[in-house]
Image: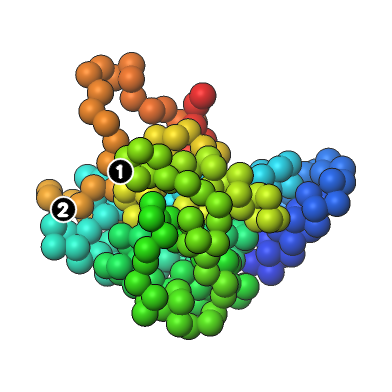
Amino acid sequence: MSITWETVRETMLHAREVRRLDGDARPLIAEIGRMREEGSDIPGCPALLDLVEAAARGRVAIGQSGQTLDGRIATARGHSHYVNGPEALDHLHRLRALVDVVIVGAGTLRTDDPSLTVRRCAGENPTRVVLSGNGSVPQDRKLFTDEAAPTMVTGVDLPCEPDENGLVDPCGVLDSLSAIGHDVVLVEGGAATLSHFVRAGCLDRLHVMVAPIILGSGRQGFLLEEVETMDEALRFSSARYPLGADTLFDLVPQR
C-alpha cells in the first residue's frame, strides 16, 4: 500500500513531538526509510519525506521558487499566474502544511497580497511572517485581515534589528522563530527575500520547481551578486522529481 498524504502529515507531527521532547529520533528516521521503500502516488513525495526527516533531526529552513527554464518567476510587468502547473502548486501547498512558519518579504506582501494558507491539500495553515526592515507594512492586506492564521512582522512581533542597509539578518530571524518553538520554516518569496536567505547561507534545503517555459525576459528567481568565475558559483547536491509537466529540484547546499 502506497504512502498517503495523511501519513506524511502525521509523520511530520510525530517529528515535531520528538523534537519538542528532545527524544530519540532514530526510530522515526527508520520508519521514514520504510515509507520511502513503500513509495507513494504523491508527486515529489520523497522530497517531502526528506523534509520530514530533517525536521526530526532538528530545526530546518527550506526555500522554494517556481520558475521557467530561463529562471524567470514572472513577466517584466509582474504577471505570474501561473508559471507552474497544478502539481507544482499542490507541492507548494503541501510544504505550507508541513512547516511551522512561512516567510515572505514586505515587497511581496505589498504587490501580491498573498494568503499563504493551505488550500490545495488537507492541513493546518502555518504562521505567516513578513520580513520588514523597519516594521512598516500595509495593514489592509489579507495576512492581517483574514484571521486564517497568526501573522508576525519582524521588528514588531519578532526582535530582529535591521543592519546599516536596512536588511534583517535571515539567520537571526530563524533564531528568533526557534526561540518561540517554530523550528520548521519555509521561505516562500519573493526573489529578493529568498535570495537574502540563500546569500546568508542559512537555508538547509531549496525546492526549485521548473516549468517547461521560456520567457526570454522578465523577473529573475534569484538576485545574487555577480561572480567572475564558475568556481564562485553556489553548488548543491540534487534530486529531481516530476511534478506533472514541471520538474522539482530538491537541492541541499554544498558547504
Residue 162 visible, this orientation: yes
Which residue is at a point 50% across and 61% down the rendered structure image? 156
Residue type at mark 2 is Gly
Query: Would residue 222 appear left or right of 49 to someone viewing this image?
Result: left
Query: Dividing the picture into quarters, in which one does residue 25 lie?
Result: top right
The residue most toward the bottom is 146
Query: Would residue 80 appear left or right of 76 to someone viewing this image?
Result: right
Query: Dividing the picture into quarters, in which one does residue 75 lie?
Result: bottom left
Instruction: Reply above or below: 168 against 234.
Output: below
Which residue is at a point 48% across and 83% down the rendered structure image? 146
The CA distance from mark 1 to mark 2 is 12 Å
Element marked by disc 1: loop
Residue type at mark 1 is Phe
Residue 178: give x, y in percent of width and height.
66, 49
From the viewer's side, name the closer residue of 245 and 251: 251
Query: Would residue 24 appear left or right of 162 to someone viewing this image?
Result: right
Element marked by disc 2: loop
Q: Tags 1 and 2 in contact by the CB under 8 Å rule? A: no
Query: Would residue 235 appear left or right of 179 to someone viewing this image?
Result: left
Return the residue at label 2. Answer: 218
How many labels were placed on the picture? 2
Which residue is at a point 54% across and 42% down the rendered structure image? 172
Residue 106: give x, y in percent of width and height.
36, 60
Quadrant for the N terminus, please. Answer: bottom right
Instruction: Reply above or below: 37 against 114.
Output: above
Return the residue at label 1. Answer: 222
